[in-house]
Image (tube, rainbow, N blue to C red):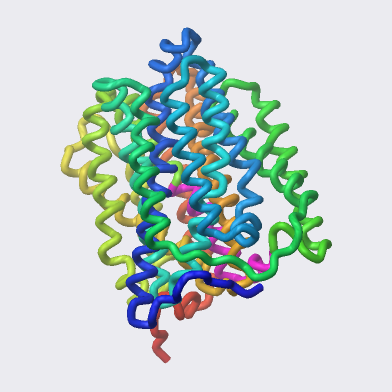
Amino acid sequence: MTVVQTTEQPSEESFGRQSRIVAFVVAVAFFMQILDGTIVTTSLPQMASTFGIEPVSMSIGITVYLLTMAAFVPLAGWAGDRYGARRVFLASITLFTVASLFCGLSGNLTEFVIARAVQGIGSALMTPVGRIIVLRNARKSDLVHAMSMITWPALTAPVIGPILGSFITTYLSWHWNFLINIPIGIIGLGLVLRFVPDQREEKVARLDLVGFFQSAAGLTFMLAGLEFVVQGTTGLAVSVGLIAAGAVFSVIATRHFMRVDAPLLDLSAFKVQTFAMSTLSAGTASRLAINATPFLLPLLFQVGFGLTAIDAGTYLLFYFAGNLGMKVITTRTLKTFGFRNVLVINGLISSVSIGCFALLSPSTSNWLIYCLLLAAGLSRSMNFTALNTLGFADIHASQRSSASTLSSMLQQVSLLLGVAVAAAVLNLSRTIHGGEALSLVDFRWAFLVIAVIGIVSSLRFLSLRHDAGAEVSRHKIKA
């Protein structure tokens, strides 16, 4: 397929600057999307009080968002090719922003659930299509910087979201947790219209409806099962059954994609070692550790140490600073050491830092905790950016749309899988020692298990070639 660009192509001199601007524009939309997902959890009790229902009933607002997003993610790549990535990205931001308005204006649970479902559709299209836009507008020499730019929302929003949400809920009202998306969304729309070129595929096959329904069912059942494990609101049998059903539909969809001539998702990207390792095998396990840590840390400080939400938030600011601080030297580090060395060595540093949280106690020096949080944030940021960049280092132009969609699907699985594994270890440890509430020892086991998973995944990257992704990192291998 040939990409047709309907706006003037930037000159060679301005191409690098153009790709950075496009990446920044996409990052703004991603930040709005991810911030919404983390900020809403802090206001569920207040929302339940407004709607006159029990707080546990509000979990449906999170679940329906997750499931509608899962159902429509497989469609994103095809839609971007068929209607133009810029047009679909604009539509996704509009859907998300308008739905946020109606979430904030909801007067009862039904209205809120409908608005969250629409939000989920916008979110499903936003991430894969936004990544496609960045890949089309960045040369390989600019890819590390571009991917680093669109990665920072995933690193920072989960950290500052709960803090910001608590502040808004306490001093304003829960409505503003959603209404805050309105100005961000409007700014994002203006930036896309101004800076993102209109590109579309010249020829696009008809929609593979069978593949869409099969893949949507697989991802929806899988994520629903993992979400129920995290919430603990249903029996273990139901959760395991949903995960099993998701696995079955995923296998069926995979076989379908391999048989048909024009599949919804081109699985040939998995034949590329760098993509397969960074997204499916070692990459999923590595992201599991990355995603479990922001879930465990606030609980450790508030439940394990008995701190207030404000005090816990102060600690997390150092973690947040580490996530941002690494961005300054990410490109230079990858150029100096290469993807393979960074993913192995930095991955081990990240995993060891996670394991060190198991050694903390309320009597530990604050400065020691600050230093550990900073180190964990720095190494987490580097690992996340390296994984996301390496995944697309060797992807052919014809594979970009499917590869972006597949990457988004697998990242959603790894996100919930990380939280689910951490929650399962916490509950298992509590059950073994017979406690009614979580204790410090439960968190120690959780951090140790997550650290071991991270170490094993880091060592798996030793199977990468020494020059893996060198065209992107510009790392020179010595003879």
Quick one: 78 or 148, which is closer to the camera?
A: 78
Q: Residue furthest bottom?
A: 479
Q: Is residue 434 above or below residue 251?
A: above
Query: Quick check: can you spot residue 265?
Result: yes
In the image, taking residue 468 as reference, residue 260 lies left or right, namely right
In the image, taking residue 212 as reference, residue 178 lies left or right, namely left
The answer to which quarter of the image holds residue 361 is top left
Q: Is residue 153 above or below residue 65?
A: below
Residue 347: x and y in percent read 41, 59
Q: Residue furthest top?
A: 52
* Residue 229 within the magenta-colored segment of the rendering: no
Q: Is residue 414 above or below residue 147?
A: above
Residue 103: x and y in percent read 46, 27
The residue at 40%/52% (across/down) is: 351
**Overall secondary structure of the magenta section:** helix
The answer to which quarter of the image holds residue 82 is bottom right
The residue at 52%/70% (across/down) is: 6
The residue at 64%/67% (across/down) is: 269
Q: Residue furthest right?
A: 259
The answer to which quarter of the image holds residue 36 is top left
The residue at 21%/44% (across/down) is: 370
Quadrant housing the C terminus: bottom left
Quadrant housing the N terminus: bottom right
Give the magenta part as a residue range: 267-290
Residue 233: x and y in percent read 58, 21
* Residue 286 within the magenta-colored segment of the rendering: yes
Quick one: 457 or 253, which is closer to the camera?
A: 253
